[in-house]
Amino acid sequence: MRDDDPRLISSRIRQLIEDMRAQWHGLDQRIAAFNAEFVSAARNEASARRLSTISGIGAINATALVAAVGDARSFARARDLAAWLGLVSRQATTGGRPRLLGITKRGNKYLRTLLIHGARAALPSLVAAESPLGNWLRGLSARAHRNTVIVALASKLARIA
């Protein structure tokens, strides 16, 4: 039997599937239009354009950072931005010995997610690069789990931003 054999799928099911495909096509077109809008916004704004030059930060990340953070000078140190996003280690201190736990996950969940996905996408190219960041990532990859490396890179990208 072939896929277009009428005995395989009823005409009603075929009609419903065609309607769903049309809806998905419409959603794909809307997503493409929104992506084009974000790219043009990132090209037109100077701070978003500068952020887009950082590996792992694209048009969506850049425009979201500019919209949420605004003037980064409001943070005293670069680590403060990473802490504001929830990308720094939680600490438990007893007897003067600090233990580093997982990330705090406080702050803007959307921005944190975008930075982690950007770090996940940029990791292979950055590990292969002969740069201080690449050397740091190779050393970290040798001793830590891949997801830990990705979150550490996301925190580093926030600090660079």
Image (cartoon, rainbow, N blue to C red):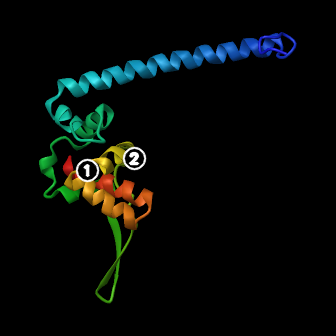
Residue at mark 1 to residue at mark 2: CA–CA distance:
14 Å
Picture quarter containing residue 62?
A: top left
The numbered disc on residue 140 is none
Left or right: residue 102 versus residue 42 is: right
* Crowd band around label 1 with a 10 angstrom C-alpha radius: few (<14), some (14–19), many (20+): many
Q: Height in image: 146 above or below 7?
A: below
Q: Nearer the viewer, residue 5 or 36?
A: 5
Tell me: residue 39, above or below residue 13: below
Q: Is any part of residue 83 visible from this angle?
A: no
Q: Residue at x 41, y 20 (%)?
A: 32
Q: Position of residue 112 (x, y in %)?
A: 36, 49
Q: Is residue 147 visible?
A: yes
Marks 1 & 2, CB-CB < 8 Å contact: no
Mark 2 is on which residue type? Arg
Locate residue 65 relative to residue 121 in the image: left or right.
left
Relative vertical location of residue 37 with respect to residue 4 in this rendering, above or below:
below
Which label sits on residue 158? 1
Which residue position is annotated with label 2? 120
Which structural element holds mark 2?
helix
Q: Residue furthest bottom?
A: 95
Q: Residue at x 18, y 56 (%)?
A: 78
Q: Nearer the viewer, residue 135 or 32?
A: 135
Residue 19 pos. (x, y %): 66, 14
Q: In which quadrant of the rendered view does residue 75 lie?
A: bottom left
Considering only order in the chain, which callout, 2 or 1, is on the residue closer to the N terminus? Answer: 2
Q: Quadrant of the N terminus?
A: top right
Across and down, in percent, residue 102 comes to: 41, 66
SS of the residue under disc 1: helix
